[in-house]
Amino acid sequence: MIAVWRCRRTVPVVLAAAMCVAEALTFAQGAPARHAMRGMVMTVDPAHKSVVISHDSISGVMPAMTMPFEVRNVAELKGLVPGAIVSFTLVVEKTSAHIERVQVVRYESVEQDPITARRLRLLQDMSRDPTMLRAVGEAAPDFTLMDQGRASIALSQFRGKVVALNFIYTSCVLPQFCYRLSNYFGVVQQRFKQRMGRDLVLLTVTFDPARDTPERLAEYSRQWNADPASWHFLTGAADDVQRVCRLYGVDAFPDEGLISHSTRTVVIDRRGALAATIEGNQYTAAQLGDLVDTVLRR
C-alpha cells in the first residue's frame, strides 16, 4: 500500500515538510516505503545530518516541493553543494523518514550529437584552468560588460543584492538550451517581481558578441518582457566576453554557423560570493526559483 502524504502547502516550507514526514500513513505489512526521487540541492547541513532539496513530484504520493531531509550517515552528504542535481531514495518508516543512496547526477547532454559532445568535452579539458574556477562560498569574479541599453554594467555594482547569472546566444535554434534558460529567468522575474531590482538582479551574458549587439539583445529581451532596470543582457568585446566565460566555466566554439556550448547558471549572494552553480539544463524553473528564494532568505 502506498504511503499517503498530506502536505499543507500554505504552511511555511520547512514546517510543511516536517508535517508531511510526520503524517506519513500506511505501509505494506509494516515494511518501510521507498521512493526513488530526484531534485536540486538548496542547502547542506552536515552538523545536523540534513539537506534541503527542491524535488520533483512522486506520482500519487506527493507534489514537487522544497523540504528538508535527514540522512542516517553523514557521508551521504559528501560532495553536495547548492545547485547540484541529485538522485536519492526516500525511506518512510512508521515514525520517521530519511533519505539514502544520495548521488550527484553529472550533467551529460543527450541533445547534442556524439561528435559535438566529444569536441565540447575536449575543449573543456584543454581550456579550463581549475585555478580560475571559484568554489561555492568564494568571491564571484568581477567583470564589466555592456547591456542592451549600452550601459556599462559591473557585477560588483550589485553588492547587497542577489544576482542570478546565465549564458546564452540569441541565434541558438535548440529550444532546450538558450531558449529554456532565458525562459527560466523569465519565470524567476515573474515569481519575484516585487523584489526585482531591489533585492534581485538577473544577468544574461552572450557568448556570441559578434552577432549579439546591444540592439539585438534589446530585441531579444523584449520577448521575455525583461525589465531593463533589473534584467541586463550583456555583451562586449570578444576578449572581454571570453574572459567572463572562462571565469565561470562556460565553453563555446563555432559549429557550422551555430555555436556548440556548455550550459551553466550561477547564483551569487548579497556578499558577492558564489551561492550555487548549476551545470546543464536538466532542472525546472521552479527549482531555480526555489534556489534563488533560499539565497534571498539568508
Image (cartoon, rainbow, N blue to C red):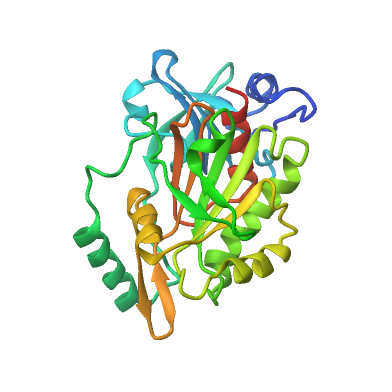
Pinpoint residue 22: horizontal percent, then vertical percent. Answer: 65, 18
Q: Nearer the viewer, residue 291 or 230?
A: 230
Q: Can residue 48 be spotted in the picture?
A: yes
Q: Which quadrant of the figure contains the C terminus?
A: top right
Left or right position of 42 against 6 = left
State the residue at coordinates (50%, 75%): 211
Pinpoint residue 39: horizontal percent, then vertical percent. Answer: 52, 42
Does 240 sit above or below residue 50?
below
Pinpoint residue 205: horizontal percent, then vertical percent. Answer: 50, 57
Left or right position of 164 against 19 = left
State the residue at coordinates (69%, 44%): 60
Left or right position of 27 against 74 = right
Q: Nearer the viewer, residue 194 or 101?
A: 194
Pinpoint residue 237: horizontal percent, then vertical percent. Answer: 42, 64
Q: Which quadrant of the figure contains the N terminus?
A: top right
Does 241 sit above or below residue 268?
below
State the residue at coordinates (38%, 58%): 240
Left or right position of 6 against 101 = right
